[in-house]
Image (tube, rainbow, N blue to C red):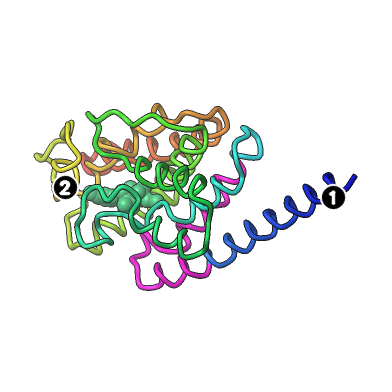
Amino acid sequence: MQDISLLLNATIETMHSNEQIIEQLTAQVATFFEQQHADHDFYHIQRVVKLAQKIQEIEGGDYFVVTCAALLHDISDHKLNGGIMNDNGRVSRLYLEELNCSPELTNQICDIVDKVSYKGAGVEDESGSLELKIVRDADRLDAIGAIGIARAFHFGGARNRPFFVPDVTPTNHTSFEAYSSDKIHTINHFYEKLLLLKDRLETETAKQIAQKRHQLMQDFVDQFHAEWEGRDF
Ligand code: ADP
Ligand code: NI
């Protein structure tokens, strides 16, 4: 009897501290992303957390790991961490250690943060846990559809890039370095990443959500070319 109550207390204690970690992490990540561009701001993080929790609810996996990894997934982005291309979840580890997250959970979360990024059309995604698949799918769902279109044009505009240059055709990047250093026009980004994402999703739930979002993007680029080439009048 005593053992059970000890176990229950320990479980309640863990649940409580996990909730506290999520709460504190959310506040810290919100502050970190305060100054970021709209293509990559705290609203993006919040949408990814929501999508990831929805997928987790249906597909299983660990709620705490999914939530923390979704919160931290862009914190080690090379565009935000001083240009380090692969920091092995270093920044996430600092946040989680500070909040006394267990080493085992910290490792699981950092592994996801480390592997979440899209690295080019010709670069295979890294394999990992169910929680990695969930967070990566959630991040990718927020890169497609209406919001995906808005983010892409915001990204290009904020960097002063043309949104279309007809004779610059898409590239099949075979390394992250080549992909991330290529200052492409925004329409090419659809062919080099956004239109490819639906076939790189791994959970059934994400694949279903992606259908409408993908179709909208496909219709958008088809109409874009029709207008550019004067085929719609
Ligand atoms: P995430 O890892 O959150 O998917 P990224 O850091 O790769 O996002 O990019 C942020 C947003 O900007 C995404 O919506 C992405 O599609 C868009 N984006 C990234 N690179 C380009 C690009 N070269 N041109 C236009 N949009 C881009
Ligand atoms: Ni992201």
Numbered disc in front, either 2 or 1: 1
Q: What residue is at 41 percent from the left and 72 percent from the top?
A: 34
Front one among 36 and 97 = 97
Measured in 3D between alpha carbons, the distance from the residue under mark 2 to the one under mark 1, in whole angstroms, is 60 Å
Q: Is residue 30 magenta?
A: yes
Q: Position of residue 76 (x, y in %)?
A: 33, 55
Q: Position of residue 22 (x, y in %)?
A: 58, 60
Q: Secondary structure at mark 2?
A: loop
Q: Position of residue 176 (x, y in %)?
A: 20, 40
Q: Is 204 left, or right, of 140 in this rendering? A: right
Q: What residue is at 32 percent from the left and 36 percent from the top?
A: 222
Q: Is 90 left, or right, of 207 in this rendering? A: left
- Residue 216 is drawn in which quadrant? top left
In this picture, which residue range is highlighted in magenta? 27-54
Question: What amino acid type is highlighted by mark number 2?
Answer: Ile
- Residue 36 is drawn in which quadrant? bottom left
Do the numbered discs 2 and 1 sit on residues whose CB atoms are within 8 Å? no
Disc 1 target residue: 5
Q: Is 20 left, or right, of 101 in this rendering? A: right
Mark 2 residue CB less than 8 A from any atom of ligand 1: yes
Residue 184, numbered label: 2
